[in-house]
Amino acid sequence: MSADEYADQGRQQRSQTETLAADRGTIFDRDGRELAVSVAGVTVYASPHEMEEPVTVASLLAPLVGRNPTDLAQELTSGAGFVYVARQLAPEAAGPIAAADLPGIH
């Protein structure tokens, strides 16, 4: 093994890439008043190609995310491979969506 190979092996053992959560926490002004806070939010997206009945999925999902069923059905049948259903939902709203176990909803 050459010196360069040993050096590369050593670098691989010492360093690695890790993604860290960007939780910023609360930002206060000089008087201690909150200026900004981190808010947990859940994103729900759809993979329409995983659905056999996208219109049915839309009618069941729309009330859970506060969307119009017709508008959601149009998005799910548009031919797109990926559709954002809802962003920044409260974490407690994700429970009923997961419990519905709808195909193609992530």
Image: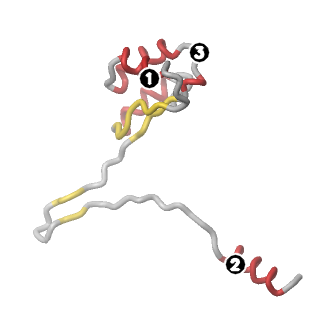
Q: Counting residues from the N terminus, which is met first, the one under dot 2 or under dot 3?
A: 2
The residue at which mark 3 appears reads as 52
- Furthest toward the right, the residue is 1
Q: Could you tell me residue 65's position as x and y percent? A: 36, 27
On the image, the x and y values in percent for residue 55 come to: 47, 13
Spatial CA span between label 3 and label 1? 15 Å
Mark 2: secondary structure: helix
Disc 2 designates what residue?
A: 11
In the image, is residue 46 above or below residue 55? below
Q: Which class describes the residues within 10 Å of circle 2: few (<14), some (14-19), or many (20+)? A: few
Colour convention of the picture: secondary structure
Q: Residue at x 48, y 29 (%)?
A: 98
In this figure, which residue is indicated by the disc labeled 1? 75
Q: Is residue 37 left or right of residue 83?
A: left
The image quadrant where one finds the N terminus is: bottom right
User: Which amino acid lies under the numbered mark 2 shown in the image of this protein?
Assistant: Arg
Q: Residue furthest front?
A: 79
For the residues labelled 2 and 3, say whether their Cβ atoms are less than 8 Å apart.
no
Badge 1 element = helix
**Disc 3 packing (10 Å; few <14; some 14–19; many ≥20):** few
First in sequence: mark 3 vs mark 1: 3
